[in-house]
Amino acid sequence: MKDQTWIVVWLFNLLNEITENKLQKILNEAALEGYLTQSAADNGISHSLGFLLFKPETKTSLTPETLAVDLGTGGGLPGIVLSALTECKWFLLDRKKRRSEFLQWAVKELELTRKVTVIEEDAANFAHSNYRHKASLVTARSFAVPGVTAECAAPLLISGGYLVVSEPPHSVDRWPVSGLDKLGLKKDAHWEHNSASFQSLILNDVIEGKFPRKFSSIEKSPLF
């Protein structure tokens, strides 16, 4: 990728304008509740910044009119942090009641209720809702294996929208073209930020039809 140092600087400056202490308090609370490890909480803000390096125009592309979705937000990463750093609307998805209640508390603590909605829902079911093909960005951290993540995310994206996923350390290519083609996705870029790896994919073709399948079916037989 091109040098994106200026984006990192802009993001950190923006983070100083909001309250970093509140974000860290929320992540620490998530660790106490067992939704994050303490290590993930300690590095959560820095790690989340990496998700926004998927294109040079990130600053201007995530406008108040655009929608972003975080799959399996759980303890708040990256969705809570990203919703505090961007102007766009956010849907934070989690299918567990307790985690969803925690996220609702976090959104209120950060005074983000105007633009952030917590949705207690299975991601595969939500992709068949009225918000199908409405998101400009979908993010995922530790959500599922690549085939499951891609199948849940692709139907939420607008044409030209991005899926950004944090990758495990030392991962090999986990996104085969043959599987992505079935969902209309194409690999875009791979980058590192603060020792973490990220992969972006772009929706080239809107594929109507059966995708995503029921979550149990996707997990049992992922496309790749």
Image (spheres, grey):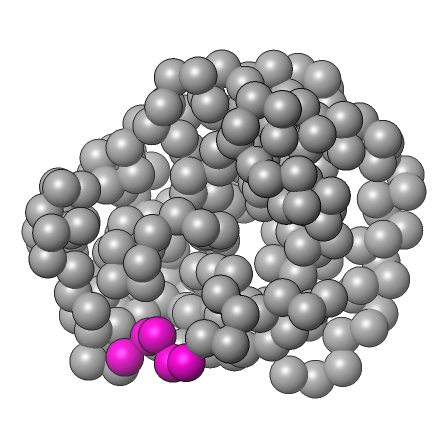
Relative height, residue 203 to residue 149 (above, below): below
Closer-to-camera residue (124/172):
172
Quadrant assignment, res 97: top left
Report x, y in % for residue 139. 48, 52
| Residue plotted at (45% across, 75% down) | 171
Q: Is residue 16 visible?
A: yes
Name the side, left or right, on which 188 lies relative to 198: left
Magenta-tinted stretch: 172-176
The one nearer the camera, 78 or 61, is 78
| Residue 58 location (% of width, % of height) | 66, 61
Q: Quadrant of residue 209?
A: bottom left
| Residue drawn at x 63%, y 24% as measured from the top left | 32
Q: How far across and how far down the image is residue 61, in percent?
A: 62, 58
Q: Residue 181: say if magenta.
A: no
Viewer can see residue 55: no
Taking 1 as reference, is 122 left or right? Answer: left
Q: Is residue 13 above or below residue 176?
A: above
Q: Which quadrant is home to the N terminus?
A: bottom right
Name which residue lies at 49% across and 65% down: 168
Q: Is residue 40 above or below residue 102?
A: below
**Number of on-image labels:** 0
In the depicted view, which residue is nearer to us: 79 or 161? 79
Q: Quadrant of the C terminus?
A: bottom left
- Majority SS type along the magenta span: loop
Q: Looking at the image, is 148 positioned above or below residue 66? A: below
Residue 34: horizontal and vertical position, in percent? 53, 28
